[in-house]
Amino acid sequence: MKIKSQKDFFAGLMFMVVGIAFAWGATNYSIGEGARMGPGYFPLVLGVILTGIGAFVVFEALVVETEDGEKIGNWAWKPLCYIIGSNVLFGICLGGLPKLGIPSLGLIIGIYVLTFVASMGGEEHKPKEVIVLATVLAVMSYVAFILLLKLQFPVWPSFIG
């Protein structure tokens, strides 16, 4: 059978792999049932749904004809590295690296670092827009996670508070 849309085919495979991984990982927890859900219930259901969506997308990529076959282009290494790197830096800012002597910088500084580094992966970098975006994200994150959900993690650098 011929692949008629490479983009859809490989996207569907990715969905299926992630879905199967979630469902398989959920089996390490008690599943429960609909009325009394265990900790593995949601990841299992999510994994099954994601696998089903992936199977549908793969099937569609094999059946539905496209004009040019929707070839997969080259990897976009610059955005990929900046976005993954920004998430790693956010984790380091949030928790620090005690073994290397790097203190926790907290949620607010972590969000600014995440936003600035991730924005450098784009075609154009507009510092004023990034500052506005980072400020909105920081305020919304503070309200959602600290005030409303009352989560306990550092908001400001550990050497300040």
Image: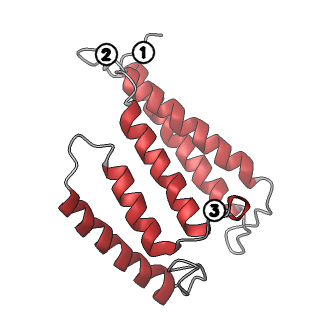
Instruction: Return the disc, 1 or 3, that comes first in the chain's sequence.
Output: 1
Q: Amino acid at mark 3?
A: Phe
Q: Find residue 133 and report its horizontal and vertical position in percent.
A: 27, 66
Query: Residue visible at 35% across and 79% down?
Result: 139
Quadrant of image for the C terminus: bottom right
Assess disc 1: are there few (<14), some (14-19) or many (≥20) residues with their C-alpha within 10 Å of its C-alpha. Answer: many
Label 2 with label 3: CB-CB less than 8 Å = no
Rendered image quadrant of residue 112? bottom left
Label 1 with label 2: CB-CB less than 8 Å = yes
Q: Which mark is residue 81?
A: none
Query: Residue visible at 38% across and 26% down?
Result: 7
Residue 66, placed above or below residue 99: above
Query: Residue visible at 48% across and 47% down?
Result: 85
The secondary element bearing badge 3 is classed as: helix
Rendered image quadrant of residue 30? bottom right
Instruction: Return the disc, 1 or 2, that comes first in the chain's sequence.
Output: 1
The secondary element bearing badge 2 is classed as: loop
The residue where tag 1 is placed is 3
Assess disc 3: are there few (<14), some (14-19) or many (≥20) residues with their C-alpha within 10 Å of its C-alpha. Answer: some
Return the residue nearer the eye: 141 or 36.
Answer: 141
Q: Which mark is residue 69?
A: 2
Return the residue nearer the eye: 11 or 4.
Answer: 11
Return the residue nearer the eye: 2 or 99.
Answer: 99
Q: Is residue 91 left or right of residue 66?
A: right
Q: Is residue 144 left or right of residue 121?
A: right
Q: Measure the C-alpha gap from mark 1 to mark 2.
A: 8 Å
Residue 151, placed above or below residue 91: below
Label 1 with label 3: CB-CB less than 8 Å = no
The secondary element bearing badge 1 is classed as: loop
Q: Find residue 108 and report its horizontal and vertical position in percent.
A: 43, 74
Q: Which mark is residue 42?
A: 3
